[in-house]
Image (spheres, helix red, strand yellow):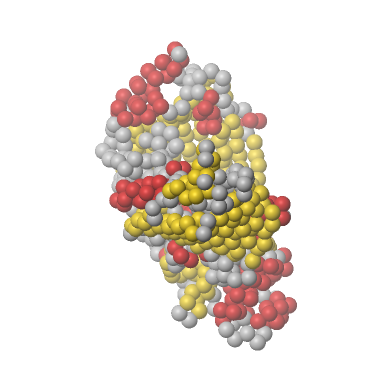
Amino acid sequence: MLKNCCSNIILFAIVFHVNIFSSAFQKSDAEIDSLVRESDTVILHEKSTLIINDLESAEYEYTTKILIKNKDAENFCRIVLKESEFVKINDIEAVIKDTSGNIIKELDSDDIKEAEASINNFYSGNLYNWFELTFHIYPYVLEYTISKELLSLFFWPDWHPQSSVPTLVSEYVLINEEDIEFSYFPVGEKIDPVISQIDGDEILTWKLTNIPKIKREDYMPPENNMQVGVLFKSKQFILDDYEGSTDTWNKFAIFYKNLTDGRYQLPENAKAEINSLVRGVKDKKEKVEILYSHLQKKNRYVDIEMGITGWQPKKASEVYETRYGDCKDLSTYMVAILEEAGVKSYPALVLTRDDGVVNLDFPSSQFNHCVTMVPIDTDTIWLECTASYNGINDTPFSIEDIHALVITDDGGEMIHTPQKYSYQNLSNTIISGELSNRGNLNFSSRLIFKGNRKNYVKPRFIIKSKKDDIIYLQHILNDNYSNVEIEKYEIDDSKNEFVVEVDGVYNKFVSKRGKRLFINPAIYNRETLDDLPEEKIEEREYPVYYNYPFLDVDSVALTIQDKYELESIPKNKSIEKPFGNFYSRYDYKNNTILYSRRFEILQNKIPVESYENYLEFLNYVIKADKSKIIFKRK
């Protein structure tokens, strides 16, 4: 108890003496003190210093002091650092101090471990350094300093002053010794640097104090994960032997185009193979479909690149020989084989939608993926070349409704990709069944998936065994009713939809109370309180985000034994909003419950101004989905 008391006294003193800069984002003394007391961890101070020597040389140092209040905070004592051919770690130092500033433990060089890992499509196969430094008496302060050498300003580090815990002081110091031309972009609010001079060098310092932890909201758009900070870029950069510019998107595209020069040539045996596949085919779209399927069947997605190959694709001839590659390798190969078939296409750099949106006003390296764009007459096809089971019309949501930098013959063009409408992302279930004497439901069902619903479900069947299929079917059919047994199932993937026919039994399907049966016919799709965002209306700051618009349609027909008679049936429900709609219909004819349900989200990003309206809508749906039909024994 005394330790916690001392810790709070120390924290209060720290907070009280921090200067408050003029910022709507930063918290008052009282607010930050409350956040500090509630948190297991507090970042007392962090500082990033970047010294630019030239376009191919910069020194970066990051130092921080973190208050560890209890064992629950020890994840902050495990530090993982990435090292690559262009970013070298020069030094790692760390100590643990008590709250009086006395050193009680130091990091030994033997405590630093190394491991290789591959984590994304564009820059992988990196070396990771990591260490863990803890102590058994709380509270204590972990201090560490990381020194790195940057061999290209392409990897200029941004400033992320906000963390998952409160931060009292965060600074970013830039020393531009060679007057390299650069620009910066404040995120969340305008943050200008303080400019000073030391020994003729201009020093820019960005600083924030009393920074609250990152706010997490249910269904929050991924682009809002960074809520305050500064992005940086050098106007010119050199990566390996390639020069580039971030002055405009076109100039950045030219840099990538130069990386791909001479890499679209195919060997003669590859050309013969491609021509044999499309011989006699006149329609361009049909050619694309044939060759996209060929790419999927013959090639594997493998991500093991290092150095410049993190950005430069392998030669198409190499992909043909090895039959594997990452996103840019496979996209390059796709462009090459389409070219051989007489179909013009282009690689396109994208930031996948699950990682946010591209800042159009800040041309720079913002991409994490590469796809292929095929313009055909008035239509455009976007091919995800790492997907093994998508058709040419099955564009995944991750590259829908985004800005893609298409690398053209002359440079580049930023093009916005289309998004499927809600009705194209369909989940349609048709269920019929009969209740047994024991209250079990023997059922037959037809599950139909289209668009992004198909993209999600299909791989979970195609790549797994029959046993795994049964487990997955039990999982999705058990969402609202448990104890389902699958007796048989069949899959049909012959059209632009994925269909699963399922027969089975829901054991203990009905709820019995005395002579009455209570039946909720919303068997497959149903909204519950778990689907409701927890933020109150006055607390919500960010839009509500779904991965894509969608439509759920359910039809249910359940036969009831004639020893029961209908006592009550819910009224039909209906509600319409600009962002979605819902209706449910109930009927009872010839001992059969007839139920239909339609739930539709028309726009996947609902503005915060509509949050109150959205909560009203969702609460209405949840209440309607709880409705039960009641039968009484005759």
At 59% from the left and 64% from the top, the residue drawn is 498
Please give left or right for residue 263 compared with residue 556 in the image: right
At 45% from the left and 57% from the top, the residue drawn is 587
Q: Position of residue 518 (x, y in %)?
A: 50, 44
Q: Is residue 52 something one can see in this rendering?
A: no
Q: Position of residue 40 (x, y in %)?
A: 46, 27
Please give left or right for residue 190 compared with residue 62 in the image: left
Is 63 located above or below residue 288 in the figure? Answer: above
Q: Is residue 138 something one can see in this rendering?
A: yes
At 63% from the left and 74% from the top, the residue drawn is 291
In the image, 429 versus 115, the foreground residue is 429
Please give left or right for residue 287 compared with residue 269 in the image: left
In the image, 479 versus 568, the foreground residue is 568
In the image, 74 versus 547, the foreground residue is 547
Q: Position of residue 279 (x, y in %)?
A: 67, 85
Q: Residue furthest top?
A: 2
